[in-house]
Image (cartoon, helix red, strand yellow):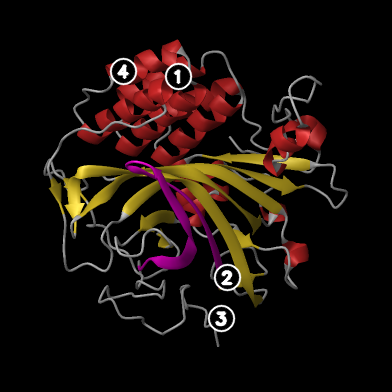
Amino acid sequence: MTVEFTREVSEFTPGGGTPWTSPLAGDPADLQSDFGHFLDQVAVRLDSRPDAHVAHEALHHADPMIREQSLYQYVDRNLPDAVDLLAEAVATDDNREVRWNALWALEKIGGARALEILERTVNDDDADVGEWAGLFASELTTGYPTFDRRAWVYHADRTFDETIYLNISCHVYVMLDDTGKHWGKITLSPQGLARSFGQAHACPNVDTRHNKLIISKSLSGLHEDGSPHVENFLFRGVTNMGDDGHGSFYFQSRGLRPIFLSGQADDDSLGHRNEQVIASRAGRWTLDPRMTIKDEAAIRYVRGGVHTWGYVNFDAMKGSSLEEILFPGNSILGTLDTPTGPLTNAFITGTFKGKLVDWDGDGKVDLNSLDIYSTRDADVDSDLDGVADEPGIQYCPRTGWHH
C-alpha cells in the first residue's frame, strides 16, 4: 500500500481543525495566533491509506516504526475506535517504544476510557512502560507527573550529567503550491520522526541547565559504514523556577547548517548552501529530589513544544510507501530569512516528552548512559572524549560542507 502523495488536494480528507465560530470566546489575538492551528484547519492529510488498512498495519506491520506511525495516523483521523486500537497496541506490541508512545497518544485523546487504560497499565512488567502510564494518568488528573522509586545510576566521567531520550510527536505542514492556499499534512509519531530526522536527546549539565542546553540528534542508517549521522544544537534561554521542583523554560538555537538542495541530509548531489538555522523550544521540566547530581536534584522528566521550518522534497515522495518516505535523512531543517529561504516549504510543530529510562535492564534508572556525540558546546565529538573533532563544527562533516 502506497501513500500516493499528490498535489491534487481534493482527493484527501482535511486535517480537521475547528473553525472560529464564537464571538464570545475572547480576543482572537490571544486565543488564535498560532500558525499551526490555522494550518490544521485547511491542510489535507497526505496519507491516503484506507482506515481499515491503517488499523491493520498499526497492529501487524513488521516494522515497529510503521506500526507506531499508523497508530498516530489513526488518532489524527479522529476515528471513534482509536482508543480501542491504542489499548490493543499497548497490550500486544512487543516494542516498548510503540507501547509507551501509544500510551502518550491515549493521553492526547484524554477522557475516562483513556484514563482507565493508563491506570491499569501502571503495574506493567516493563517498569518504564508502567511509569509512563502512571505519569500520563497523573498529568491527566492533576497536571503533574508522578514517578516510581527505582534506584538509579550516574556516571561521573561522562560529558553530560543527563542524557534524556526525547519522544517527539509532530505535524509537518507542507506547501503544495505557491499560492499559500493549499497545504498538506504529514503526522509523524516519535519513531517516525526519529527515522527521518534523527533521534533527539536533551543533554543538560546541572551547572548550566537554567540557561544552556544541548540537543543532540543521532541518525542511524545514513552512512554505509554504520556510523551515526550527528547533528548538535546549542540552545540558550531562560528558566523560571517559581514552582518548587519544576522549571518552566524558553530556549532558542541558531547554528550554521548545510541546506542540501536535494532535500536529504548529506546528499550533496545538487549542492548546498551554509545557512543559519533557527529553532525554539519551550516547556517544563520536573526534578526528582531522590536523584542527586553534584548535590542538585536531577531532571527526571521534561515536556514541551517545539516549532521550526524545513525543506521537504515533495516531488520525490509522490506514489511512495511509508517505508520509502520515512527513510534516514529524508527532509531537513530549514529557515526563512536566508538565500535558501524560498526552498523552505514545511512548517513543523509538535510536542515532546522525555524521562529517564532503564536502558540496560538492570532495574535501575540510567541518568547519563546514552552515547552523545557532542561536546558541552555542541561540537561533534565522534569518539566521546569530550573534545571536538573540529572546533566549531556541530553537524556531521561527511560531505565536507563546512570547507
User: Seen from this angle, which residue lies furthest front?
Assistant: 242
Can residue 181 be spotted in the picture? yes
Lower position in the chain sequence, tag 1 or tag 3: 1
Magenta-colored stretch includes residue 246: yes
How far apart marks 1 and 4 lie (CA) works out to 17 Å
**Which residue has dot 1 on it?**
85
Q: Which residues are magenta?
A: 227-255
Q: Amino acid at mark 3?
A: Trp
* Relative to 59, residue 230 above or below: below
**Which residue has dot 3 on it?**
401
Using the image as rendered, state which of residue 299 and residue 98 is in the foreground. Answer: 299
User: Seen from this angle, which residue lies furthest right?
Assistant: 179
Say which quadrant the C terminus sits in: bottom right
What crowding class fits label 1: few (fewer than 14 Cα within 10 Å), some (14-19), or many (20 or more)?
some
Q: Is 31 placed left or right of 297 in the picture?
A: right
How far apart marks 4 and 3 lie (CA) works out to 50 Å
Numbered label tally: 4
Tell me which corner region of the image, top left, top right, bottom left or bottom right, holds residue 334. Answer: bottom right
**Which residue has dot 2 on it?**
267
What crowding class fits label 2: few (fewer than 14 Cα within 10 Å), some (14-19), or many (20 or more)?
some
Disc 1 is placed on an element classified as: helix
Lower position in the chain sequence, tag 2 or tag 4: 4
